[in-house]
Image (cartoon, helix red, strand yellow):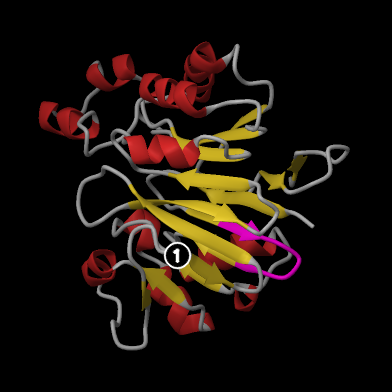
Amino acid sequence: MSLSITHLGTGSRGNATLLATDASKVLIDQGFSGKELQRRLRQLEIDPTEIDGIVISHHHGDHGGGAAIANKRWGIPLFSNFRTATALGLDLVGGVTLFEDLERLDIGADISLLPIPVPHDGADNVGFIASRGSGERAAVFTDLGSWTDEIIQHLRGCSHISIEANYDHRRLWEGPYTNSLKERISSRGGHLSNQQTGELLGKVVNEQTKSIVLTHLSEQNNRPHLAESTVLYHIDELFEGDIAISLQDGPLFSHFIGQADTEMLTSGLL
């Protein structure tokens, strides 16, 4: 029995991550149209009606803009904190289950999620620690401009970590964005650079960390090889597992926790 982590796509044009066991299926974020979500799930031979719930990390449209559509079209339950639900215009009476930071969510038959507050602009933003009772944990953290001691505490010891590596510092500052936008992206409430992601992972990666996925790469200000090489510079002597890149078009692969050591940690989908 294992928990799979599959990114249906990450980036500024939409984000959704599927957590699945034999008994439960949960989406972290739903930033796609209903048609696009259905198309991506179909590649995994999953119907949207099989999803037990959608948990929303924050109010930006590329993460939560398609949640209400999924709820209305397929009856998928929604989970959000109050400020995110309000910002997205979700129905607070019967349309969404509200949660607080550090309040464990049990969704489906055997998936638990712990929302961890993260620094990012706008409404209250969270990352999620997922588990299914095996003792192993998976982290899915996107859209954060920095980290806290609390984030370090919860990431340390996770078997799997999905985390954003949004931009390469040089490409951002030499690129066409306005100075104000560059400053917002690189601020504490913005996004993590490749360098920052490497520094953070250097604080939390240990022998328990089996896989890492770098997510939410900017199509304008980053490249996969830059993200991977910069992060590996910081963790090369600490990490012996699998590292992968999640881009806008997915799903491309899955990672698993809770498997026997003889099983593969990663499987290709396409």
**Residue toward you, 31 or 120:** 120
Q: Is residue 88 left or right of residue 212?
A: left
> To which quarter of the image does residue 235 belong?
top right
**Is 215 in front, or is 11?**
215
Most extreme residue toward the bottom is 94
Q: Is residue 23 magenta?
A: yes
> Residue 129, how many percent across, how many down?
50, 51
Residue 84: quarter of image: bottom left
Residue at 22% across, 39% down? 189
Instruction: Name the residue: 28% across, 70% down.
Output: 85
Hey, which residue is sitting farthest right in the picture?
262
Q: Is residue 26 magenta?
A: no
Which residue is at a point 25% across and 56% down the rendered structure image?
124
Q: Is residue 249 visible?
A: no
Q: Which residues are magenta?
A: 18-25
Q: Secondary structure at mark 1?
A: strand
Residue 118 drawn above or below residue 123: above
Q: Which residue is mark 1?
A: 55
User: In the rendered view of the protein, which quadrant contains the C terminus?
Assistant: top right
Let me know if residue 269 appears in the view: yes
State whether residue 68 is above or below residue 5: below
* Residue ID at (60%, 72%): 51
Circle 1 Cα neighbour tier, 10 Å, few/some/many (<14 / 14–19 / ≥20): many
**What's the amino acid at mark 1?**
Val
* 141 displayed left or right of 43: left
Quarter of the image where one finds residue 40: bottom right
The spot of residue 117 in percent (x, y) is 32, 50
x then y, percent, for residue 99 = 36, 69
Left or right side of 56 for 81: left
Residue 89 locus on image (x, y percent) = 25, 74
Quadrant where the N terminus is found in the figure:
bottom right
Relative to the observer, which residue lies in front, 94 or 245? 94
